Amino acid sequence: MLRTVNRVLTALSGLVLLALGLAVLFAAAGLPHRWGVSMPSDWPWTRPGDVLLTDADRTRWRDEGWWWPVVIAVLAVLVLLTLWWLLAQLRRRRQSEALIDSGDGEGAALRGRALEDVIAAEAEAQPGVDRARVTLTGRRDRLRARVGLVLAAHARPGPVVHQLRHEAIRHAVDSAGLDTLPAEVRLRTARHRAERVS
């Protein structure tokens, strides 16, 4: 959901800024007057010297009793929404624990880091894998795994991924009592010196 909110906010902000910038350029270049384009009656810019808000517009509501409370409330809501968005960006995406069925109807919590370490250790024990890193994401009752594997120079990716799926991931699912553990695997090769052929 956060990704969708980010995209919508970014798209809306971009559209508003683009429209505002184009309107300012349109007026600053004097194009409405040169091209004889009739703008709406309340349109603020028609010539390069025009301003967005006149003195009367800027001071119109100052003497009203409701003006400052409304301004402060709107600004406070904007600040709170901005802080919420910022904290959501900084929030750790790693799942700290997994909810497993203990058989007593209440369930138990398994530390996510422990499960990550076990999967990574078993993946590193596979032939052809130099290093493995595992991150659990998703919800406590619906985990997903992101696995990063660094393959040895001559490893074949297909068999490595097949073995990871049928051993490390399957063992984690069985031992933790999970229904499933969808995994996204990213592969890269270990850097190595070029071999000299004689």
Image (cartoon, helix red, strand yellow):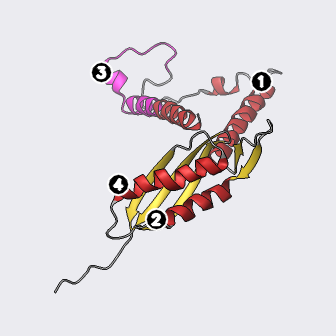
Q: Which mark is residue 67?
A: 1
* Residue underneath mark 3: 35
Disc 3 residue type?
Trp
Q: Given contact means CB atoms under 8 Å apart, are the residues at marks 4 and 3 in contact?
A: no
Q: Is residue 123 visible?
A: yes
| Of callouts 2 and 1, the N-terminal one | 1
Disc 1 residue type (three-letter): Trp
Q: Position of residue 152 (x, y in %)?
A: 38, 69
Tag in front: 1 or 3: 1
Nearer to us in this view, 151 or 96: 151
Q: Position of residue 111 (x, y in %)?
A: 71, 54
Q: Which residue is mark 4?
A: 158
Q: Which mark is residue 126?
A: 2
User: Mark 1 and 4 residues: CB-CB less than 8 Å, in contact?
Assistant: no
**Mark-to-mark CA distance, 1 and 3:** 39 Å
Foreground residue, 108 or 30? 108
Percent coordinates x, y for residue 19 in the rendering? 44, 29
On whether residue 86 falls in the magenta region, the answer is: no
For label 1, count other residues whose C-alpha is less than 10 Å away and answer few (under 14), some (14-19) or many (20+). few
Q: Return the disc, 4 or 3, that comes first in the chain's sequence.
A: 3
Instruction: Give the mark, 1 or 4, whose residue is nearer the N terminus.
Output: 1
* Vertical position of residue 4 compared to residue 114: above or below: above
Front: mark 3 or 2: 2
Query: Which is in the foreground here, disc 1 or disc 4?
Result: 4
Figure check: 163 above or below 65: below
Q: Quadrant of the N terminus?
A: top right
Number of the label disc, if any, that sits on residue 2: none
Q: Which residues are magenta?
A: 18-43
Q: CA distance from mark 1 to mark 4?
A: 67 Å
Q: Quadrant of residue 5?
A: top right
| x then y, percent, for residue 7 | 51, 35
In the figure, 40 relative to 59: above or below? above
